[in-house]
Amino acid sequence: MEILTMVVIIGQLIFTVIAGMYFYGALKNQRNTRSAGTLESSRAMERIQRMRKVKLTEPLAEKVRPKALGDIIGQEEGIEALRAALCGKNPQHVIIYGPPGIGKTAAARLMLEEAKNVKGSPFAKDAPFIEMDATTIRFDERSIADPLMGSVHDPIYQGAGAYGAAGVPQPKEGAVTKANGGILFIDEIGELHPMQMNKLLKVLEDRKVFLTSAYYNSDSKTIPKHVHDIFQNGLPADFRLVGATTRSPEDIPPALRSRCTEIFFDSLKKCHIKRIAENAAESVSMEFGSDAAERVTMFASSGREAVNIMQTAATVALLDERNKVLTDDIERVVKWGRYSPRIEFKVPEKGRPGCVNGLGVFGSGGTLLTIEAWAKKAENGKGRLKVTGIVEEEEIKNGSQTMKRSSTAKSSVQNVLTLLERDYGIDYSDYNIHLNFPGGIPVDGPSAGIAIFTAIYSAVTNKIPDPSLAMTGEISICGRVLPVGGVPRKIEAAVEAGAKRVIIPKDNFQKSFEKMDIEIIAVEKAEEILNICFIEENKGILTA
């Protein structure tokens, strides 16, 4: 019996020693692992700190970035409209249209800062400005990851958070919640995935976002109170949306457009590009030749391009040990970058029969359209009509449907021919007529109607139109001048092209046009156009 007891004691002692050695080894390994982890963390932290000490020079684009709304060049009307939309007691959702590099993001950010100081504004002093780019928003259809709307890390997924081990789904806030009380800015909002767009529209209506999870149980006692509250009541998402896009309004879903105030930022003019280039040169403490900034305006179409050209040219000058940017430096940069010159149209100095200055909309701005007509008497009834430079057939998208129709510009030509025959006795079948729209800009609307009418009439009668006059407007077969779109931009284009007078439909006239630096003539009938547009020595116009 004593021997058996002794064996048991010895066995327990051996087991105790073995267990002690095992736990000692495990503890030692744990300490070693912890020590190795601490050492690795220390090394990583040192490397990050060394990286943070490395500072390159501040990019010129950051130096010239607008610090105040007044620093945004060439968008005075857009800024005024944005202020009206965001700085009142009831700020609106906004979509800003315009080409890249003209200050849409900067305007939205700075406008929030201004709105915070407006009496009665709902934006608090700490209102957030959350910025996202629709082209880079990646999401999982199972809602595992969604940086815009928010997501739920279920217990089975890596990164489920502190409650994962307990089987608790953990909600993660998205940008719509982080922007609560402030502005959510989505750049290139037209590129947003349709599924995300629909979710965003729902959030705009509810001003909250609901998350779901198959692992959520409303009766579970192990789920924390705040998680219950999120799943049952949603996360707050009361913000104002500011979307920016380079697309046309027709490319944006109507459901989104109906919820937003639409604001248009214009393409920059040469004078705006020049100011930006000069500011860029001053920011790097460089002098510049009298023609250097002017040369930039011939190639840069946005503020971003102007800054890039000027920064590279300044570097060229410094490498040549000069403190002055010369025109030759700009030329070299333009050649390296293969920049294309800006398309510019100017009214001619001298008039010719059949040559008329029309006006149209191209991209986000207006443009001058030269319309040429040539006519020669042909044998009775054997005349031919040739039209070049216009879109023969237009493609119209209506949701998922695509329709094709004859060009509206081509229809305008037919209307003009009917009007000339009916009211002025000019039968186009008695003439060989060539009507041309040069310049490479597609003419696909009815607004060139009065210009086409004037050009053909001028070619047939050999009368010279006023070369300093530009015009826009649709014309009916009854000789009435009908309203068209984009008139303010077209008038600005006429001013930019050097026109002294511009003819527009009477129904398009606005009191604000009187402040523009050009004589604006509003007309109702075709005969008014003819009595206005021909130079003094060629008066004696046929009237209906």
Image: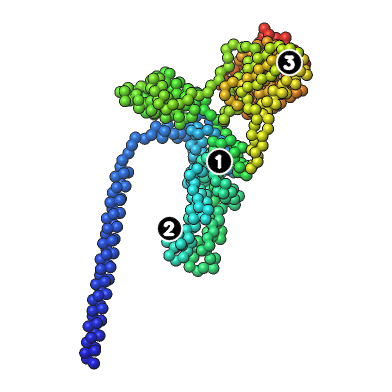
Q: Residues within 10 Å of mark 1 (few under 14, many from 20)?
A: many
Vertical arrangement, residue 67 with respect to residue 314, above or below: below
Vertical arrangement, residue 55 with respect to residue 212, above or below: above
Name the disc covering residue 159, or none: 2
Front position in the image: 477 or 503:
477
- Coloring scheme used: rainbow
| First-in-chain label (1 vs 2) | 2
| Quarter occupied by the C terminus | top right
Front position in the image: 396 or 79:
396
Element on which disc 3 rests: loop
> Is residue 185 at all visible to an observer of this figure?
no
Q: Kindly identify the amino acid type of the residue bearing the numbered disc 1.
A: Gly
Q: Are marks 2 and 3 in contact (CB under 8 Å)?
A: no
The Cα–Cα distance between marks 1 and 2, rounded to whole angstroms, is: 32 Å
Nearest to viewer (mark 3 / mark 1): 3
Name the disc covering residue 382, or none: 3
Q: Kindly identify the amino acid type of the residue bearing the numbered disc 3.
A: Lys
Determine the image quadrant of residue 337.
top left
Q: Kindly identify the amino acid type of the residue bearing the numbered disc 2.
A: Gly
Q: Where is residue 152 in the image (x, y as percent from the top left)?
A: 49, 57
Q: Which residue is drawn at 59% across and 17% down?
A: 499
Residue under label 1, please give it: 190
